[in-house]
Image (cartoon, helix red, strand yellow):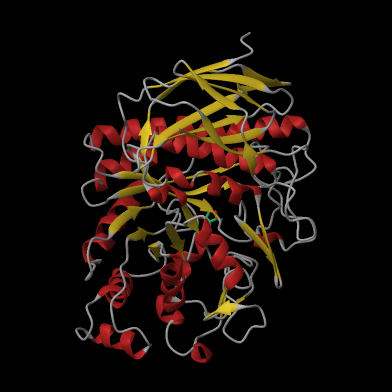
Amino acid sequence: QAQQATAKIDASRPGPQVHPDIFGQFMEHLGTGIYGGVWVGERSSIPNDGGYRRDVLDALKAIKVPMVRWPGGCFADEYHWRDGIGPRNRRPVKINTNWGGVNEDNSFGTHEFMGFAQRLGARTYVSANIGSGTPAETSQWVEYLTAPANTTVLAKERAANGRKEPWKLDYLGIGNELWGCGGNMRAEYAADVTNRFITFAKSGNGKMLKIASGPSDANYEWTETMMRMSAKHIDGLALHFYTRPRDEKWEDKGPALGFPEREWASTLQHTLQMDEYITKHSAIMDKYDPDKRVMLAVDEWGTWYDPAPGSNPGFLQQQNSLRDAMVAALNINIFTKHAERVKMAAIAQMVNVLQAMLLTDGPRMVKTPTYWVFDLYVPWQGATSLPVTLDSPWYHKDDVAIPAISVSAVRDTAGAVHVALVNADPNRALPVSVDLGGVQASGASGRILTAGEMDAHNSFDAPDVVAPAAFDGASVSEGKLSVTLPAKSVVVLKLR
Ligand code: AHR
């Protein structure tokens, strides 16, 4: 078996743009994802900018979060947008029936979400309530958000609530998981409902892309039906896929920390299925949309483990380790490969929930290994993908076998080429030789993310256990990049 990986970048056949929005983030009214994690209110002792945590804003700005999806998830199909506008002390308190049965005081609503996205400089993705709402409610929300100033009654109400000018709504989600928590619909029924809601949702302020509730995992029948019945009305079809160490039983996913090596391997094997799912859903989409106008929007992805010990199981809190960093990097490499069809994605979820960028506890905040992967891949945002072929050694653990190496490459808008390399083998350093396919370069340098333990992670008391370090172990000679990737590492290089 080969002990070295060989790859070839085909720079003469540049691929499509890696849409910045594949680095999008999902924030739901779930646990402390919003309340406490992003929003603390103006009167909080936690330093804030108009109610938004400053530490969180600064950290998210640094990774150039391009797009945020809100308010759910399952929460979206029970959310009534009118509950979240107007003076906060008069907003109704409801029960969050999906996530822990806690009170939802609606203090984070439409204005707060749009203000958050604006502070980040991020595009906006609002998921409408299709499951339990009406077409009128959705169309009025869109009107409230986007109608030009001083026009309709809703535009005037928006102004009375403090926002005269319309916002730009970039994406409208037509429900969420309509096959499940969004209404338990059959695909045919969901497609009819989707078409009906879309007919009446009209932006008053520029292009608004409509994203239909799509399949989960390998539900190809759903994709077939939605595309057959709705392709001409929609701009995107959502794909949801959660990575789990143990995928036999939903109730038993495996712990986030302290896992055996087999669960390192099975997690990475499971996450690599993203490639197969995207390939097969895309092939179905090609039948109905050969020009690839309709995007596949992977608007929920990431790891889902057993809840953190002692946490409210409805809050989906979990630690984030080097294993999550590998998952993030492998998926970004997969999205880069499929940039033609995958033009938007949203990791679940941004703060404190599932595979989060950031964890908070009262005034404290810590950046996760996943955060650092998003930081390493910033040059991918808006760059041109470059095709890569790869011959990799395999990593075996018990009954699990996966290619040890994953590679992606892009050319940024300034012309520089960047190469990302992942070594998923937790035990072996592996040499990789990359034929640069004519790209002129004399050297390469960049950063590495790795750690001693498979479940190395950052905590409030030890926040820098997993953080990028400078990496100068790569060389270029005769058109080839040579690098030995340490075990369980992500290395991102810029050629010069
Ligand atoms: O991200 C958590 C939940 O997972 C979302 O609310 C739902 O869409 C999915 O099932």
Residue 388 higher or lower than 149, as above or below: above
At 28% from the left and 54% from the top, the residue drawn is 192
> Residue 9: x and y, percent?
41, 23
Q: Is residue 111 left or right of residue 144?
A: right
Which residue is nearer to you in this view: 377 or 156? 377
Which residue is nearer to you in this view: 339 or 211? 339
Hey, which quadrant is residue 35 in on the image? bottom right
Residue 412 higher or lower than 83, as above or below: above
Residue 238 higher or lower than 99, as above or below: above
Ligand 1, by image quadrant, is bottom right
Q: Tell me if I can see residue 438 in this picture.
A: yes
Q: Quadrant of the C terminus?
A: top left
Residue projecting furthest to the top: 1
Q: Tell me if I can see residue 186 in this picture.
A: no
Q: Is residue 130 left or right of residue 462?
A: left
> Residue 294: x and y, percent?
28, 44
Q: How many marks?
A: 0
> Residue 113: x and y, percent?
45, 72
> Residue 439: x and y, percent?
38, 25
Residue projecting furthest to the front: 442
At 41% from the left and 72% from the top, the residue drawn is 114
Q: Is residue 114 left or right of residue 327?
A: left
At 80% from the left and 42% from the top, the residue drawn is 258
Q: Quadrant of the N terminus?
A: top right
